[in-house]
Structure formats: structure tokens, C-alpha cells
Image (cartoon, helix red, strand yellow):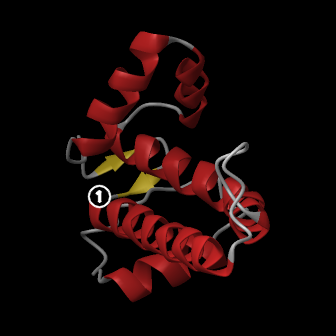
Amino acid sequence: MNITEAFISGFTNWKNFSGRACRSEYWYFTLSVSLIAFILAFLEAAAGIFSVEFGYGPFSALFQIIIIIPSIAITSRRLQDRGVSGWWQLSYFTIIGIFVILILLMLPAKEDENNWGRNPLLDM
């Protein structure tokens, strides 16, 4: 999966919290969202509408609101690809949980088939 396909898949499956997402889909989606956020921040700073007090401008804030649900959904599917529930994202509220989730997101799929379906790499 390339970066364009991952970005489109992330937004077309924005309400799909079941199933699985391969590593490339998750990381390319994250990369594309990060690049867009960087470009928006740069444009806001150049236009003088970047708020130093808040750390973002109006377009960045709107973009963050738009991507929050697709980001949670794709992270949930990526964790389920690994074989753990998407509810593990709640461990973000602990310091150690952030690192646990990051490691789980980097690891490959554990099985060809699990409770959330078939490995998406086998369907390609």
C-alpha cells in the first residue's frame, strides 16, 4: 500500500473500528497526516495567523478535529491486526501505555486469521 492509498483508506474507513489494518496502511496514513499538519502550520506561520500561545492556528485546529476519528479508527484496526483489542488505546492515559501502544503498532501481524478477520496482506 502506498501513501495515497493509505490516506484514502484512512478517510473512507473513518467509522470502521473493526477489522484489521496492515503496518504500511497505518504508518503511511500517519506520515501523510503529519506532512499535511506541517504544511498547514508553515502556511499559518507565513500568513501570520499561527498562535504561539496555543501552538497552532485555525486551519491546524480544524484539521486536527477532522482527523481525530479516522486516526482512532485506523489505530484500532492496526492494534487488532496485532491481535489485541482497539480498546488498548485507552492506555494512552498512562505514561507507560504510550510506549506499549507504540511498540504494538510497530510489530507485524501475529496470525493469518484472528478475532477481527483475515490478515489484510494475504488479500493483496
Which image quarter: residue 32? Answer: bottom left
Q: Residue at the bottom extreme?
A: 4
Work out which residue is located at the far front of the displayed protein and give it: 48
Rendered view: 90 above or below 17: above
Residue 40 is left or right of residue 84, and the answer is right
Q: In which quarter of the image is residue 4?
A: bottom left
**Percent x, y of residue 52:** 66, 49
The image quadrant that residue 25 belongs to is bottom left
| Residue 33 locus on image (x, y percent) | 50, 68
In the image, 33 versus 100, the foreground residue is 33
Tell me which amino acid carries mark 1. Answer: Arg
Question: Is 49 in front, or is 101?
Answer: 49
Q: Position of residue 19 (x, y in %)?
A: 53, 56
Question: Split into 4 quadrants, where in the image is the C terminus?
Answer: bottom left
Q: Residue at x 68, y 63 (%)?
A: 50
Q: Is residue 121 above or below residue 43?
A: above
45 up-or-down from 27: above or below: below
Q: Is residue 29 above or below residue 79?
A: below
Count of marks, rendered view: 1
Judging depth in this view, the residue of 70 and 67 nearest the camera is 67
Instruction: Residue at 28%, 66% (x, y): give it.
Output: 24
User: Left or right: 52 with respect to 32?
Assistant: right
The quarter of the image holding the N terminus is bottom left
Question: How far across and how far down the image is residue 114, in percent?
Answer: 38, 43
Measuring 65% from the left and 61% from the top, which residue is drawn there?
Answer: 70
Q: Nearer the viewer, residue 83 or 52?
A: 52
The residue wearing badge 1 is: 23
Categorize mark 1 by other alpha carbons within 10 Å: few (<14), some (14-19), many (20+): many
